Amino acid sequence: MIDIAAINKTYPIQLGEKKSYQALRNVSFQLSRGKTLGLIGANGAGKSSCIRIMMGFIKADSGNVRILKRPPFQASSKEQIGYLPEQPCFPKNLSCIEILRFCGKSSGMTNSKIKESSEYWLKKLNLWNVRHRLLRTYSKGMQQRASFAMALIHNPSLLILDEPMSGLDPIGRADIVRIIEQLQEQGKSILFCSHILDDVARLADKIVILHQGEVLFDDNLESLYMTTSESVEEAFLRIVGAQA
Amino acid sequence: MNLNHLYAVIYITFMDGLRKKSIIGLIIFAAMMIMGGTLFMDFFGRDIGKASIDYLFSIMWLCGFIFLLFHAVSACVLDDEHRNSLTALSRPISRNEYITGTFIGLAILLGCLQLLLGIASYGILQWVQESIATRYFPYFSIYYFLLSVIGVILQQYLLLAVIVFFTTLLRGVFPVILATISYQLIGSGIPVVRKSIQQTLETDHSGHSSQNFMQVLAAFFPDLNQLDFKNLITTPFLHIEHLGLSLLSITIYICIILGLACFIYSKKDLY
């Protein structure tokens, strides 16, 4: 589903900066069909750069990227991708139902299918009663759930989730974890970034640890632990600390 | 270009703009300026028809310009800064479709604003004409009035295309506003300078290089005055020369600018 091979990315010098910044160095990893990959790392590790490259927002300087066997810059490659950004970003003067109609229309869905799928996801995410309210009046958690509905409305086979639990209260977080588990049961491929390592340990089949733009670990969850009593947080700190 | 994708982008751009409080405020401001102007009609004297038309079209131009600088610029730039564009581009929408859809959505919104002001202006002009003696306002052509409104809209569509182009080149609202104002000032200044050079050439034949330079500049800054038809509304016997050519050249110019914007945006990294 995702095949990233030896990519490098350096951001050019911006006004007021003295040198360019290398965000990714020789990064490679794969995600197979039906699996869940947890991409973890400290702030500035390169997780967001990886996701932007996968979504075709920025280009890698070198290396090869294939998403669903297609280059990420092709608009058609996004037909089967559901993307959840780190911060909810949509025109705030639209209602939730309008933005879902936009998402459905742009994904080639019919009006009846859009209606049916919107109702299903809005009810599941507890947004049905507020579907006609403008998004600017939503709380952060509600905006995050609306973003989730946007990512899922067209029933994608690959989900790219950037901090899916960000801004959610414990109840909202538990709901999202439950939905991700259901999506895993349906055989969806999922890549997600999270700072909440417990969620990663609970959901991911495979872990990629990024640190200062480099991949430090890329294997199954079981291989991450040195001892049976080690937590994912301790394992992460051990790997990152060894590099530092 | 997929029409479903284009329609989706046009829809969110239009609806998002329509519900902005600043746009509603702009419409109220324009209505007050148009209505307020009627209080001063008595001071206009003999040429009341021409003065009223100048005043009303100035209001239309000003409101359109405010819309462009304070809504269109922020809609295009903040879209990038607030990453709303990424919401659209994470769907199977190409960057060309996004740029074109945004332009059309804003253009429809601007067109609606100008049509609304045009209808109000037409009503005011009718009222003024009926209120005074025929000799003060002898002729009023609705066809040229419509043509003049189209002229204003087309001039502002050109500026809108320029704004979209600048937002693909520059970062931030302020640089784009500065670049747009500079473009407008240079564009409106060139015909004056060209006329001055022509007058100089009649007496002194050494200024051909300046004239050539002005011709080169004219390719980048088309003369927007060629779309100013408002003098014809009250003066029916003037001929419009090269009307079709003017409309066609400005339309082609808009398409070229948008094409360039699409090209640059498709190559740009969206951080």
Image: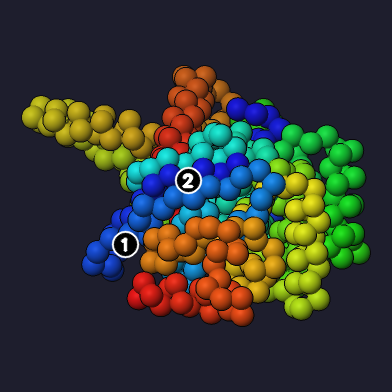
Tell me residue A163's x, y (percent): 62, 66
- Whether A210 is drawn above or below B163: the answer is below
Name the residue tied to disc 1.
A21
Q: CA distance from mark 1 to mark 2?
A: 21 Å
- How did the renderer colour the structure? rainbow
Q: Nearer the viewer, residue A5 or B30?
A: A5
> Which amino acid does the dot numbered 2 rest on?
Ile
- Residue B171 image label: none
Task: Give the percent coordinates (x, y) of residue A92.
Answer: 69, 61
Q: Which residue is mark 2?
A: A4
Residue at (66, 43) in percent of width and height: A33
Say few, some or many: other residues with alpha carbon within 10 Å of mark 2 (under 14 / 14 to 19 / 20 or more).
some
Q: Classify mark 2: helix, strand or loop.
A: strand
Position of residue B191 in the picture relative to residue A178 (left or right): left
Mark 1 residue type: Tyr
**Where, by quadrant of the figure, is residue B110 drawn?**
top right
Determine the chain carrying the residue at label 2.
A
- Residue B144, picture quadrant: top right
- Examine the image and state in which quarter residue A104 appears: top right
